[in-house]
C-alpha cells in the first residue's frame, strides 16, 4: 500500500491506496467465518498480498498474551511515559483538542468502495471489514477509553445524480452510526474519504479538475452541513482525507519545488477554504463547529509545506477564536509503523525510532501550536510484524505521550485486520466483540491522560 512512500511521514491509505489494506480491495470482497473464529479476505494486491481480516480466539493477560496461532508472546510491560510538557496556548480550541483525549478511526468500513462488484450499495460497509457495524462495537470502543471516533466515509459510490446528491439510504446508515457514538458521549469526526481518485469523479487537486473538485466538495458539504446543523460541538467535520495527486510519481512524497505538487498544494488550500465557507454558511451550530483541514496527502510534510495555508474564518464568523484545526496523518517511523518490509523493532531506549516521532511533532508544534492553531493526528498506528507486541506497546505509549505533551490528540487506525501479509492494524476484533491487543489499548490509555 505504501510502496511508493519514501519519507518517514507516511500516511495511511486513501482511495486506491487503501485497496492494498488487509481487509479488502476495490475488486475483491471480504467475509468472516460465521463462528467468529476466523475471517478471510478475498481481495489481493500484488505488492502486499492479502490478509485475513479476523482471527481465532485469543486471550490477553496482565503478564503475557496468547496469539491467535496458540503461541505465547513475551511478557508485556505497559510503559507510562513521563514527557516534559511543552507550553501550549490557553484557549477554548486547545481545551477542546485536549478533551478529544485519545481516538480511533473506524477503518475499512464506510470508507470502503467497490465500483463494479457490489449488487447493493449498502454492501459497501462490509466489503472490506467483513461485518456490519453495531452499536455495541461503538460502546466497546468508548468503554475501553477511546473518547473520539473518526468515521471515514466514501461518498462517490453513493451519488444518485449529476448534482452529487447522496443516496438517502447511505446517508441514513452513516447517520445511525454517528448517532450511536454521539449518544454514548463520544466525539465524532466525519469526513470525505476515498473520493480523491480520478475515476471517482469526486475531487482531484489539480487545475485540470478544479471545477469538478469545487462542485464535489461544495455539494457534499452542503448536504452534510444541512443534515447535522443542529448537532453540538462533539461532531467535527474533516474536509478531505489525504488530498493528493493519485497516481503521480509524487503521490506520497515530494521534493521541494516540484511544479505539479506546488499547484496541488494551492488547489488544496482553495478546497479547504471552500469547505470552511460552505459549512459556516449553513448556519446553526455549523457556524462555529470545529473543522479539520489537511495539507498535501495529510502528511506532516504536507502541513509543513511552505505554501500550505490554513483556511480563514469568514468575515461574519461569530466565534471568539478560530475553530479550524490542522489535520495530519503520521505512521512514523515509517519503517516500523507501516513498511511491511521494514523493521519490527521499536525500543524506548533506541532514539533511531523515537527521534523521528520527536522531529515531526516538534516541527508541527513550532509552526502551528505556538502560533495558536491546534493539531489533530487523525491516523497513526503500527502494523503487527511477527507478533512484535512489546515493540508496538512501546511505540503506542511513546507516540501518544509525546503527542499529548505537545497538546495534540491522536487516533489509531483500526481496520479490523489481524493476520496475513497486509496491514494488520486492528485492535478490536469486531466479529468476536473484544480487543485482541488489550496491551496496546492499555498503553494508549495510560499515556493519553
Image (spheres, rainbow, N blue to C red):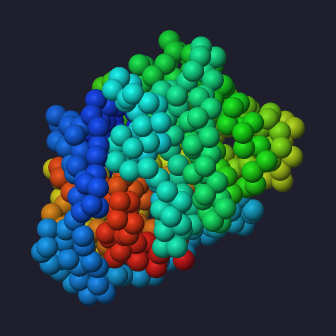
Residue 123: x and y in percent read: 42, 37
Residue at image location 22% in from the left, 49% down from the top: 40
Residue 267: x and y in percent read: 56, 24
Q: Quadrant of the C terminus?
A: bottom right
Instruction: In this rendered view, identify the residue nearer to me: 1 or 55.
Output: 55
Residue at image location 31% in from the left, 69% down from the top: 436
| 178 vs 201: above or below | below
Q: Quadrant of residue 266?
A: top right
Left or right, 315 with reference to 233: right
Q: Please tell me how many numbered marks the rendered image carries.
A: 0
Q: Is residue 47 visible?
A: yes
Q: Is residue 356 visible?
A: no
Residue 195: x and y in percent read: 48, 29
Instruction: In this rendered view, identify the residue nearer to me: 216 or 362.
Output: 216
Q: Quadrant of the N terminus?
A: top left
Q: Quadrant of residue 352?
A: bottom left
Residue at image location 51% in from the left, 40% down from the top: 153
Amino acid at each position: 500500500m505504501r510502496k511508493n512512500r519514501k519519507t518517514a511521514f507516511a500516511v495511511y491509505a486513501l482511495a486506491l491506496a487503501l485497496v492494498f489494506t488487509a481487509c479488502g480491495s476495490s475488486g475483491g470482497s471480504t467475509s468472516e467465518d460465521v463462528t467468529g473464529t476466523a475471517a478471510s479476505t478475498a481481495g489481493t494486491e500484488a505488492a502486499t498480498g492479502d490478509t485475513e481480516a479476523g482471527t481465532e480466539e485469543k486471550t490477553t493477560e496482565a503478564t503475557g498474551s496468547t496469539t491467535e496461532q496458540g503461541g505465547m508472546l513475551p511478557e508485556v510491560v505497559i510503559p507510562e511515559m513521563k514527557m516534559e510538557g511543552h507550553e501550549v496556548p490557553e484557549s477554548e480550541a486547545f481545551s477542546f483538542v485536549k478533551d478529544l483525549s485519545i481516538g480511533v478511526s473506524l477503518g475499512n468500513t464506510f470508507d470502503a468502495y467497490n465500483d463494479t462488484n457490489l449488487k447493493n450499495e449498502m454492501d459497501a460497509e462490509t466489503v472490506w471489514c467483513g461485518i456490519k457495524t453495531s452499536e455495541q462495537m461503538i460502546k466497546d470502543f468508548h468503554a475501553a477509553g477511546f473518547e473520539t471516533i473518526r468515521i471515514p466515509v466514501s461518498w462517490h459510490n453513493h451519488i444518485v445524480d449529476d448534482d452529487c446528491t447522496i443516496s438517502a439510504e447511505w446517508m441514513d446508515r452513516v447517520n445511525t452510526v454517528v448517532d450511536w457514538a454521539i449518544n454514548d458521549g463520544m466525539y465524532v469526526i466525519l469526513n470525505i474519504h476515498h473520493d480523491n481518485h480520478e475515476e471517482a469523479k469526486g475531487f482531484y487537486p489539480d487545475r485540470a479538475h478544479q471545477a469538478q473538485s469545487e462542485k464535489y466538495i461544495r455539494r457534499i458539504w452542503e448536504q452534510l452541513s444541512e443534515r447535522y446543523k443542529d448537532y453540538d460541538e462533539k461532531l467535527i467535520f474533516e474536509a478531505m482525507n489525504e488530498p493528493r495527486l493519485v497516481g503521480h510519481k509524487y503521490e506520497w512524497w515530494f521534493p521541494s519545488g516540484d511544479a505539479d505538487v506546488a499547484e496541488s498544494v494551492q488547489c488544496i488550500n482553495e478546497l479547504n477554504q471552500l469547505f470552511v465557507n460552505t459549512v459556516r454558511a449553513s448556519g446553526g451550530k455549523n457556524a462555529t463547529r470545529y473543522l479539520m483541514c489537511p495539507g498535501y496527502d495529510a502528511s506532516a510534510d504536507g502541513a509543513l509545506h511552505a505554501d500550505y495555508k490554513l483556511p480563514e474564518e469568514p468575515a461574519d464568523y461569530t466565534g471568539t477564536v478560530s475553530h479550524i484545526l490542522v489535520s495530519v496523518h503520521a505512521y512514523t517511523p515509517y519503517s516500523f509503523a507501516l513498511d511491511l518490509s521494514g523493521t519490527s523493532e521499536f525500543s524506548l531506549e533506541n532514539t533511531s525510532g523515537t527521534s523521528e516521532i520527536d522531529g515531526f511533532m516538534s516541527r508541527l508544534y513550532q509552526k502551528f501550536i505556538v502560533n495558536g492553531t491546534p493539531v489533530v493526528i487523525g491516523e497513526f498506528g503500527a502494523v503487527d510484524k511477527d507478533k512484535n507486541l512489546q515493540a508496538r506497546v512501546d511505540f503506542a505509549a511513546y507516540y501518544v505521550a509525546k503527542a499529548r505533551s505537545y497538546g495534540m490528540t491522536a487516533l489509531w487506525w483500526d481496520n479490523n485486520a489481524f493476520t496475513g501479509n497486509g496491514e494488520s492494524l486492528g485492535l478490536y476484533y469486531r466479529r468476536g466483540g473484544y480487543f485482541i491487543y488489550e496491551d496496546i489499548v492499555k498503553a494508549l490509555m495510560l499515556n493519553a491522560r
